[in-house]
Amino acid sequence: MTLKHRKWARFLGLSVASAVSLCLGAFLSYEAARQQEPATQLLAEQALAAPIPAAGTPAAPSPEKLAAQIPDAAPKFEPKPAPDVAAAPPSGPILASLDSDAPPVFSPATALNLPADLRSDDAPAYVEASLTPSDDVTPAAAKPEPLPAEPEQAATNDDLFHGRPAPLPPARPTFVPGGLPPTPPVPGQGPAPVLSAPSTASAGLASPTPGAQQAGLSGFANALAAISSSVGGASSALSPAETEPAPPEVASGGFKMGAPVYIRIFKKESVLELWMKRGETYALYKTFPICRWSGGLGPKEHVADYQAPEGFYEISARQLNPHSHYHLALNLGYPNAYDRRHGATGDSVMIHGDCKSVGCFAMTDAGIDQIYPIVAAALRNGEHEAPVHIFPFRMTEQAIARESAPPSNLLSFLGQEKARPHRDWSAFWRNLKEGYDLFERSHIPPMAYACGDRYEFGDAGRTCTRIAGW
């Protein structure tokens, strides 16, 4: 699978996960609303079925009487005392006398002219009423219209709940009972924060009942949290986040985990050399056998030629792939600036695990398990790019002459890998030998540039392009 295909697959995976998260969130809200529906529907039906009190009958009980029937857990209604009114009782509803000797008073500084049919000469009549501070009733000379029946008063009739305390309206749940499970930590990013439900005391919420905890909401919320955690932090595929312990050879050889590294590959000898900086120069840390590489000697030229490349490459942190199909992988960044100048095509050339190759260098899982963490530690510790130099063989004049010569007999011709047509790569190989010799003399990897149709090293002109990673 090419890098472009993997990016599309990752994008589609994130899109599907986001869609599933939205669906689960909508379903969770639907379940919470459905749990409130029976109690709300019952209150509405009872309110519609309650008789409307006729004119002249006592009004609905005041909020104080209803508050007395509500359990202690609910807040009670406490009206503010009326200033400078001696006839007002200390608590309870205001009693307004309809006798001719006493004007009907409902609140301080307000009066209400009641209809004449409510007056009686035999005994004073009393009407229970409760006015809020916002009610501003002014006396009028004309006969006022009867007050319309309030739906809330009809719903709080004494006969509505058959003598039982009025139930509190259901509240929409604002937290998940029991909290959410801890999210598994992402390697190299420390433990994930533990998600928990907010404190009911600080939020002013009543403690959930055991029945609410078993209502099934926590299961859906936990599934939603699991999907969110899988979409988040773990989706960064190209990240040097793996923190592996240093192999014992690092300390024993005087090397330091996190020091700059340099990789050198020889195709004909099938070996990979891992060098680490020790002091001012680089020293050979370990030589790993290459399990398999494909193609023959010579550079890679186009896509699907199953040829392993040769040349100078750089690996940055973006080119590390801890989620490779071949365990772990280091993307070489092929084609580099030199390859592109020569029209080379292709991509996704790796140093990876397993023992299969279609243009890559397969090191086995055990081999890449040692190489990958050392390279990742170097990039994480400040090395901007790790150089990788790939040679066809140990670069000597004798080897170049030997491998550049055409086949001398039929057996040599038949022994050519994949029967690739013979080409003279001697000029290209001698250009690679320049970089090889610079490292052999100084044990410091040279900086490579693409200048025209060849590699240059060290200080290069403005027309040259530095060989760089992503």
Image (cartoon, rainbow, N blue to C red):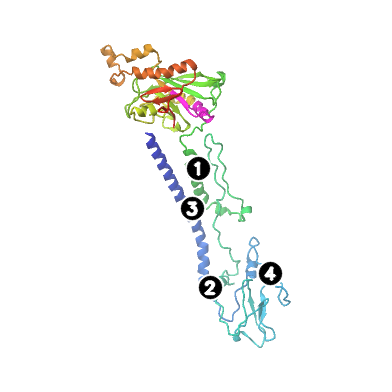
Contact (CB < 8 A) between labels 3 and 2? Answer: no
Specify the farthest residue to the bottom. Answer: 121
Magenta residues, start to end: 372-388
Q: Is 166 placed above or below 340 here?
A: below
Residue 403 position within the rendered picture, expressed as x and y whole percent measured from the top left: 34, 15
In the picture of the structure, the residue carrying the numbered disc 1 is 229
Q: Secondary structure at mark 3?
A: helix
Q: Is residue 293 left or right of residue 377?
A: left
Residue corresponding to mark 3:
28
Q: Residues within 10 Å of mark 4 (few under 14, many from 20)?
A: few
* Horizontal side, residue 405 vs residue 28: left or right: left
Binning the other alpha carbons within 10 Å of mark 2 as few (below 14), some (14 to 19) or many (20 upward) gives some
Residue tagged 2: 50
- Relative to 101, residue 444 above or below: above
Relative image position of residue 380 (x, y in whole percent): 52, 30
On the picture, is 335 further left or further right than 123? left
Residue 329 located within the stretch drawn in magenta: no
SS at circle 1: helix
Asked which secondary structure carries label 4, the reply is loop
